[in-house]
Amino acid sequence: MVRARNRFDDLDAEIEDIDPGKAERYLSINKEGNRKPSTIHVKKLTSDMEEGRWRFTGDPIRFDVNGHLVDGQHRMMAVMESDTVHKFLVLRNVPDDQYAVLDQTKPRHLKDMLRNAGATNATDAASVVTLYYALLDTNDTYYKFLAKPTPTQGLKLWHDMGGDETFKPNLTLGRIAAQKSCYRSSVATMLKMIYDKQDEEYSNRFWNNIIYKNNADQQSDASTRLFLHTIETFTDRKLITESQPWVRNRSGVFSTRELIGWTTAAWDRYVNNRDISKDEAKDLFSNKYIDRYVKEIKNYVLNNPLHICTGRYYY
C-alpha cells in the first residue's frame, strides 16, 4: 500500500548553532507582514542571553515554504544584540496556513516557575519579586514601577533572595498587613524585607505597631499616627471612587509609589525616635515627600541589594 503524500512531507528539522551573523541573515528574509517587533521583549531576551539564563527549549525557529522567517524574529534580534551564539531547533518548509495559529499556547509565567520550584505561595512571591525588580530599575525616574523581569530573571532573583525560607514568613506578614490595613501584601512584604536588613528588631516592632495599632513602646507614635491618617485618606478616596463607577480599580486607591513613600517616611522617623504631628502626617501625603522617600528606598536597595548573586541559574 502506498502512503498518500501530505503537506508535511517536505518539513525539514535541524538543530543549528546561530551566531549574530546567521541571525542577521535570517532577519533579512523575515516574512513581510510579520508582527511588529517588541523592543521590550527583545531587551528581556537579550538580558537572558547575556547573563547566561537562556537555555535550549526546543521551541523552533520557523521558515515557510518560500524560505521566509515566520517565527523567531525576537530571538534572532536578541542573538544579535547580545553578540552570543545559541542552539535552536530550525523548521523549514512550514505550510503557510500554520502561520495563523502560531503563538497560541499559554505562556509560562513567573508564578508558574516559582510554584514548580517549591514556593509556598507562588502568586504572592511573584508579585514581591516583580516589585523588587522594579525597585532596581534605574530608568524609572517617575516611580511608575512598570519594569517586570522575565520568568527566568524572576526565578533566579527568588532563589538569590533566599527562596521559600525567606519569603514564607514575610509573605505571612504581608497578608496580615493587607487584611488589617490599607496595604497590598506585596508592598508590605517587600518593605518588611528591606527594613529587616536595616534593623530587624525595629522592623518587627514597627510592623507590629502598624498592624495591631500597638502603642506599647515610645516610638510607636510615628508609625501609628501615619497609619491612622492613611486610614482617613483611604476612607475619603474610597468614598469618592465608589461614587465614580468609571474608576477601574476602586479597591486599589493607593499606588505603589504612595504606599512606599508614606511607609518609609514613618519608618525614617521611627528608627530616629521622632514623632509625627497630625499636620506633618498630612504633609507627608504630598508628592514632594512621597518622591523623596521612594527615591531614598530605591537608592538603599541599589546599594544594599537583598539578593546575593550566586552565579547559578535555575530552570
Image (tube, rainbow, N blue to C red):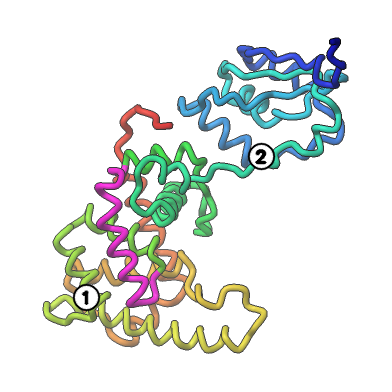
| Mark 1 or mark 2: whose residue is earlier in sequence | 2
Name the quadrant of the C terminus: top left
Q: Would residue 171 be counted in the magenta stretch?
A: yes
The vertical placement of 22 against 156, above or below, is above
Task: Examine the image and state in which quarter residue 249 appears.
Answer: bottom right
Name the quarter where the N terminus is drawn. Answer: top right
Label 1 sits on residue: 209
Callout 1 amino acid: Asn
- Residue closest to the eye, 78 or 6: 6
**In the rendering, at what x and y percent does residue 229 appear?**
36, 84
- The image quarter in which residue 240 lies: bottom right
Q: Are marks 1 and 2 in contact (CB under 8 Å)?
A: no
Q: Which residue is mark 2?
A: 39
73 left or right of 257 in image: right
Residue in view at x 35 percent, y 77 percent: 181
Depth check: 131 or 179 in front? 179
Residue stretch rendered in magenta on the structure: 161-183
Q: Which residue is found at the position 28% from the left and 58% from the top?
A: 170
Picture residue at 75% right of the left edge, 14% below the top = 12
In this rendering, the count of numbered labels is: 2
- SS under mark 1: helix
Report the Cα–Cα distance between label 1 and label 2. 45 Å
- Image coords of residue 158 (percent x, y): 36, 43
